[in-house]
Structures are given as C-alpha cells and as structure tokens.
C-alpha cells in the first residue's frame, strides 16, 4: 500500500467533509420534505374525514328527503283518490238532482192537469146545478101557474056555485 501524499490526504479530507456536508444538507432537505409530506398527508386525511362526515350527513339528509318525498307522494295519492271519490259523488248527486227536478216537474205538470180537469169538472157541475136550478124554478113556476089556473078555475067554479046558491 502506498502511503498517501500529504497533499492528496488534504484533498481527500476536504472531499470527505464536503461529501458529509452534502449528505447532511440532503438529509435535512429530505427531512424537511418528509415533514412537509407528512403535514400534507395529515391535512389530506383531515379533509378526507371532513368529506366523509359531510357525505354521511348528506346521505342522512337524502334518506330523510326520500322518506319525506314518499310520504308526500302517498298523501298526494290519497288526496287524488279523495278528489276522485268526491268528484264521483258530485256527479252522482248532480244526476240525482236532475232526476228529482224531472220528477218534480212531472208531478207539477200532473198537478196542473189535475187542477185544470178539476176546474173543468167544477164548472161543468156548476153548469149542471145551474140548469137543474133553472129547471126546478121553471117547474115551480109552471106548477105555480098550474096551481093558479086551478085555483082560478076552482075559484070561478066555486064562485059560480056560491053565486048560484046565494042567488
């Protein structure tokens, strides 16, 4: 082995020191980068956890919204069914009302016809009664006249008999 010369040994020492300084710098730089990466990873994990919490909250809200929507759809279907039922009842009642109005009008017409017939019969009966009264009155007049004639004749006959007796 050769003994290094004093000049080469100084250079070697300087190179060793310079290599060690470079390595120290590189290590320090690596450590700084590692710390920075760790910090970024920690921030990313925190952000990820926050996003997970928000996602969980949003899923819960979505579930509630879907339940509310289902309830509202059920209510809408119930209301629609009620509305259909009420509309059907309205149509039935309207039909019944028209039928009742027709019946009332028919009964009113029948009553008017009955009234007209009754009035006509009443007038006819009054005419018959009037004719009967007139006939009776004529008969009574005739009977009275006949009685008067009879009385006159009887009276004449009796008067002449009385005159003959007293005379």
Image (cartoon, rainbow, N blue to C red):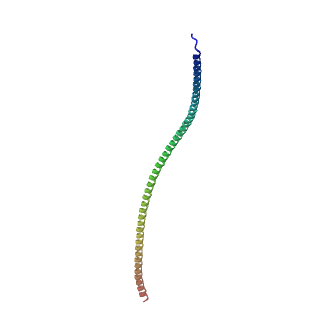
Horizontal side, residue 112 vs residue 44: left or right: left
- Residue 102 location, x and y as percent? 43, 56
State the image quarter where residue 28 is shown. Answer: top right
Report the residue at 43% width, 59% height from top: 105
Residue closest to the eye, 61 or 95: 61
Residue closest to the eye, 8 or 52: 8
Report the residue at 43% width, 64% height from top: 115
State the image quarter where residue 48 is shown. Answer: top right
- In the picture shown, does residue 54 fall above or below 9? below
State the image quarter where residue 59 is shown. Answer: top right
Residue closest to the eye, 85 or 146: 85
Task: Give the residue furthest to the top.
Answer: 1
Q: Quadrant of the C terminus?
A: bottom left
Residue closest to the eye, 156 or 55: 55
How many numbered marks are there? Answer: 0
- Residue 49 location, x and y as percent? 57, 32
- Residue 136 location, x and y as percent? 41, 73
Report the residue at 44% width, 55% height from top: 98
Q: Quadrant of the N terminus?
A: top right
- Residue 94 location, x and y as percent? 45, 53
């Amino acid at each position: 082995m050769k003994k290094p010369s004093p000049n080469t040994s100084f250079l070697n020492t300087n190179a060793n020191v310079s290599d060690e300084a470079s390595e120290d710098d590189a290590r320090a730089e690596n450590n700084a980068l590692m710390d920075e990466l760790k910090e970024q990873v920690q921030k990313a994990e925190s952000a990820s956890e926050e996003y997970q919490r928000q996602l969980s909250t949003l899923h819960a809200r979505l579930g509630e919204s879907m339940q509310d929507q289902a309830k509202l759809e059920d209510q809408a279907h119930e209301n629609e069914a009620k509305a259909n039922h009420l509309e059907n009842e309205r149509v039935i009642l309207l039909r019944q009302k028209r039928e009742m109005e027709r019946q009332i009008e028919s009964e009113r017409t029948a009553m008017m016809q009955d009234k007209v017939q009754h009035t006509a019969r009443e007038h006819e009966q009054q005419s018959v009664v009037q004719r009967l009264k007139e006939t009776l009155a004529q008969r009574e007049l005739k009977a009275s006249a006949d009685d008067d004639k009879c009385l006159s004749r009887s009276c004449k006959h009796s008067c002449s008999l009385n005159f003959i007796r007293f005379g």
